[in-house]
Structure formats: structure tokens, C-alpha cells
Image (cartoon, helix red, strand yellow):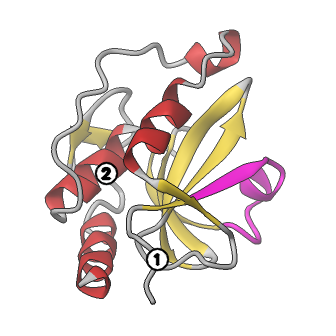
Amino acid sequence: MSQVQRAAVVAEALSWLRTPYHHNARLKGVGTDCGQFPLAVYEAAGVLPHVDTGDYSPTWNLHRAEELYLGFVQRLAHPTTRQALGPGDFVVWRVGRTFSHGAIVIDPPQVIHAVQIEGAVTLGDMDRDVDLISRKALYFTLWPKER
């Protein structure tokens, strides 16, 4: 079952490519940010219910130590290791003072995420993109361990 869900997450995420970056939005083809994008994808793929994050400042991670983004991730997913990552899993990087940027795994090391500096949802590589490899990362899955 999880393989079907994982494939649905990847397909949905890829359908968001080139959606413009827009703070606190989650409308495919119109606008999204790195927090709303994964929530919209997991919801559309039937993995998560709708999650309301409320309003948040686009620069909270630069001025506060509260792990706001990571708190949501920890309530919705389970920690895993880099070696165990699979399609549809999630990676969170420290940006500023907190873990505040996330991406959905397509096929390790390829990820998809909403990147403000690039202005859109784009593909990335955890092993090659300087902005990713230079930051501390945490790894998560939304599925239980398969036996």
C-alpha cells in the first residue's frame, strides 16, 4: 500500500513544478511556499488530512528560535535516516535559526521543493546543491517501517 501512496505523492509533487513561490499560499500553478507545498501534495495524494498552519511571517526563522516548521513535521511524520529515504519521504534543513525549509524526496538524492530565491517549485539534488549540502538536515517518513 505504501508504494502506491509514495508514487501518488511523487506524481502530485511533480505536477507542481514551476508553480510560483508565494508566501503562505498553496494553489497549484498559482503560488506556494516550502511549508504549504508539501502539505498540499500529501493532502492531494490522500496521505494527510488538511492541515491549517495559520499565518506566519516569511522571516520568522531568522529572528526566533521556536521550531515552528519542525514542530509541524514532527507531529505529522516519523524520523528516519538518510539511508532509509524513499520516494515521498521528507527532508527538512536548518535555515537561519531553525529547521525551516523542506522538500519531498522524488528518488534520493533528487527532491522537489518551493525555493524562494528561484521563485518557484523546482527540482533539487541533496548531494549537489550547495544551498542544501551546506545545511544540517533531518529526515522523515510518513509511512511505518515495512517488514
Q: Residue 145 carries which label?
A: 1
At 46% from the left and 43% from the top, the residue drawn is: 73
Rendering coords of residue 120 (x, y %): 42, 48
Q: Which mark is residue 33?
A: none
> Tag 1: residue type?
Lys
Region in magenta: 126-139
At 49% from the left and 42% from the top, the residue drawn is: 74
Find the residue positioned furthest to the top: 63
Left or right: 46, with 65 as reference point: left
- The answer to whether residue 138 shows anywhere in this view is yes
Looking at the image, residue 102 lies above or below residue 36: below
Secondary structure of the residue carrying numbered label 2: loop
Secondary structure of the residue carrying numbered label 1: loop
- The residue wearing badge 2 is 19
Q: Residues within 10 Å of mark 2 (few under 14, many from 20)?
A: many
> Tag 2: residue type?
Thr
Rendering coords of residue 50 (x, y %): 16, 41
Rendering coords of residue 63 (x, y %): 68, 9
Q: In which quarter of the image is the N terminus?
A: bottom left
Tell which tag, 1 or 2, sits nearer the viewer. 1
Front-lying residue, 24 or 3:
3
Q: Quadrant of the C terminus?
A: bottom left
Front-lying residue, 16 or 3:
3
